[in-house]
């Protein structure tokens, strides 16, 4: 009698164990499937976020490139406008120089002591070599003589005498030089103003 009962108990235990194992296997499979699905979902989220980040970077790069191209075009336009303005100003300065040059002979011919006085030839006007030397050194057309430690120009024995000689230039020569030099100064100042304006606009 004991043996059949033992067999029955063992059979029942085996059945229970099999049921438990089946349940455990099902639970494992369910957990694995769930974890796998969640992992795939998380991976898809990461991929989507990465794709969105790359797309955002691409849009930002495209926007920056577009802005840079626009700024470059605007800068080129400003440079072209400045160049055209400078060319027009230089043309006007040259016209003014030509006009004034044409008047030099007339204004160095005769003079009147008063409005109702008759015209008379201009008296002689002598410009010394010293005058020309100072003029040229002031404009940078000549290099100053060597200086003493105190700052004064070192005189040479012949300097006072040579400075008093006639330089051989006339009022017309002096005025002609001034007209040309004034054109250069105005043109240089205009170029400097245009450059400063462009630099300030870029800030």
Image (cartoon, grey):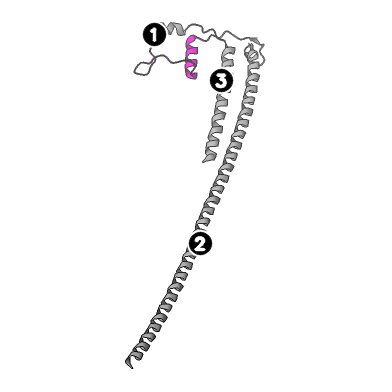
Question: Which is nearer the eye, 78 or 56?
Answer: 56
Residue name at image x 41 percent, y 14 percent: 145
Task: Give residue 83's quadrant in the image.
Answer: top right
| Gap in angstroms between the C-alphas marked 2 and 1 | 94 Å
Give the mark nearest the N terminus, 3 or 1: 1
**SS for dot 1:** loop
Q: Position of residue 112 (x, y in %)?
A: 64, 13
Mark 2 or 1, which is nearer the eye? 2
Do the numbered discs 3 and 1 sit on residues whose CB atoms are within 8 Å?
A: no
Residue indicated by mark 3? 181
| Residue range corresponding to the magenta coloring | 126-152
Position in image of residue 37 (x %, y %): 48, 67
For residue 70, above or below residue 177: below
User: Which tag, 2 or 1, sits closer to the chain's start?
Assistant: 2
Label 2 crowding class (10 Å Cα cut-off): few <14, some 14-19, many 20+? few
The nearer-to-camera label among 3 and 1 is 3
**Is 31 displayed left or right of 66 in the figure?**
left
Circle 3 crowding by C-alpha within 10 Å: few under 14, some 14–19, many from 20: some
Instruction: Identify the residue position indicated by label 1 in the image.
Output: 156
Q: Mark 1: few, some, or many residues within 10 Å (few <14, many ≥20)?
A: few
Can residue 98 be found in the magenta stretch? Answer: no
Residue at 52% of width from left, 36% of height from top?
Answer: 199
**Picture coordinates of residue 146, whole percent (x, y):** 39, 14
Seen as rendered, the residue at the extreme left is 2
Left or right, 154 with respect to 45, comes to left
Find disc 2 in the rendering and name its residue: 44
Near-viewer residue (86 or 112)? 86
């Amino acid at each position: 009698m004991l043996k059949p009962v033992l067999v029955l108990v063992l059979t029942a235990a085996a059945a229970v164990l099999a049921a438990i194992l089946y349940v455990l296997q099902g639970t494992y499979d369910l957990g694995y499937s769930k974890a796998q699905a969640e992992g795939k979902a998380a991976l898809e989220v990461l991929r989507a976020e990465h794709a969105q980040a790359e797309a955002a970077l691409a849009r930002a790069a495209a926007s920056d490139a577009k802005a840079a191209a626009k700024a470059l075009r605007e800068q080129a336009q400003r440079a072209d406008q400045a160049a055209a303005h400078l060319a027009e100003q230089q043309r006007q300065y040259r016209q003014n120089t030509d006009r004034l040059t044409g008047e030099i002979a007339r204004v160095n011919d005769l003079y009147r002591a008063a409005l109702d006085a008759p015209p008379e030839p201009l008296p002689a006007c002598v410009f010394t070599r010293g005058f020309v030397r100072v003029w040229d050194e002031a404009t940078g057309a000549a290099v100053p003589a060597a200086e003493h430690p105190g700052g004064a120009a070192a005189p040479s024995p012949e300097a006072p005498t040579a400075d008093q000689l006639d330089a051989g230039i006339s009022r017309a020569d002096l005025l002609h030089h001034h007209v040309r030099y004034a054109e250069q100064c105005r043109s240089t100042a205009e170029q400097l103003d245009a450059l400063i304006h462009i630099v300030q606009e870029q800030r």
